[in-house]
Amino acid sequence: MNRFLLSILLCLFSCVCSYANVRVLSIGVSNYPETSGWNKLNAHNDVELMRSIFPDAILLENVSATRSGIEAQLKALALNAAKGDTVIIHFSGHGQQIITTNSADEIDGVDEAIVPYDAAKRKTSSYSGQNHLTDDAFGKAIDNIRKSVGPSGFVIALIDACHSDSMDKGTDNHKEIYRGTDEIFGAEKMSEEKISSLRDSYHNQDDTSLKASTDMSNVVYLSACRSDKRNYEVVVDDKGYGSLTYYFCEEYKNKGISDLSVFLSAIYYGMENNQTLKFHGQVPSIRNTIGWEAPSKIITLPPDPPIGAGGNIGDSSYQTIIWCIVAAVVIIIFIALWITRKRKK
């Protein structure tokens, strides 16, 4: 019954995506200010890729992609979007965790945040994190858009930035580029023990379900990786792209969103099977209100070798040999003691 209802729901969303007005906001930060502490990324390629598919997209790049600039466009989308519209918000840049001011909201004591152009990597006397766009603030902006488009609309948030671990280009000039930092903003004066404790208690947002609402649209949050993983760029024809942006655009170009379930699964499988991402154990996090779930991995264990068969020795055979050796040693010791006593008599 649940599968039947999900199929009907996905078909309805497919109709919405096919015929409703599609509004797109694409945000990319490749070149952060030198004083910010952030390394360069290939986010410009991501924005160009989005523009090639959505020519009417609103674009914010580098100096335009400040926190205030991003929030202004999110508010404009909430004001201008009509009932039944499909809205896609795309961010490509750095991500960072930041010490939360409300630990009741975050189990692990940190907020995940996207890093606008004017957000610095470290806390200083002149910067206290006010330009980081936290998941709470971003989520409220998305909810406002969901209310505007209503239950007949649809919202996709595409976040090509990691929310926790190291993602910035390594100082060893390694060819792979990964986005973000393992430095938790606001933790500069914390002890290593406290920071280690924070990292040990990372709370993965992809394990947190989203609930649908009767007064606003359904939503899909696509993140390039789990909150405790790195987000690596992929290289195609000698050009670097955000991994999530690339696979999202590839699937959209090839098939569109004629079947939302198939579309999300294709993105997941594409990233899961990419050799670079596979090597680093990176898969996307796709939280949603439509009931889609990431495919479960089935791990097949090799059968135990039959006892007495050739080749490698099985565990049971190995244990039998050990016990035989132990028994033989005990018998030899017993015989030696018995002979010694005989001679004394």
Image (cartoon, helix red, strand yellow):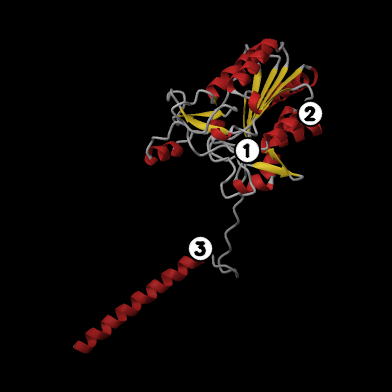
Q: Quadrant of residue 15?
A: top right
Secondary structure at numbered mark 2: helix
What separation in Å lies between label 1 and label 2 (alpha carbons)?
Answer: 24 Å
Residue type (three-letter) at the residue carrying disc 1: Lys
Residue drawn at point x = 62 percent, y = 45 percent: 298
Q: CA distance from mark 1 to mark 3?
A: 52 Å
Is residue 87 among what the camera can see? yes
The structure residue drawn at horizontal position 76% and vertical position 35%, both measured from the top left corner, is: 250
Identify which residue is drawn at 59% across, 38% down: 39
Mark 3 vs 2, N-terminal side: 2
Q: Give how far across and how far down residue 171 sits, in percent.
A: 56, 47
Q: Which residue is mark 3?
A: 315
Discs 1, 3 touching: Cβ within 8 Å: no
Point out residue 4 in the picture as x, y percentages from the top left corner. 70, 25
Please report the residue visible at 51 percent of the width from the left and 39 percent of the height from the top: 182
Tag 2: amino acid: Ile
Q: Position of residue 93 (x, y in %)?
A: 62, 32
Q: What residue is pinned by disc 1?
A: 40
Q: Quadrant of the C terminus?
A: bottom left
Mark closer to the chain start, 1 or 3: 1
Q: Residues within 10 Å of mark 2 (few under 14, many from 20)?
A: few
Residue on which disc 2 sits = 53
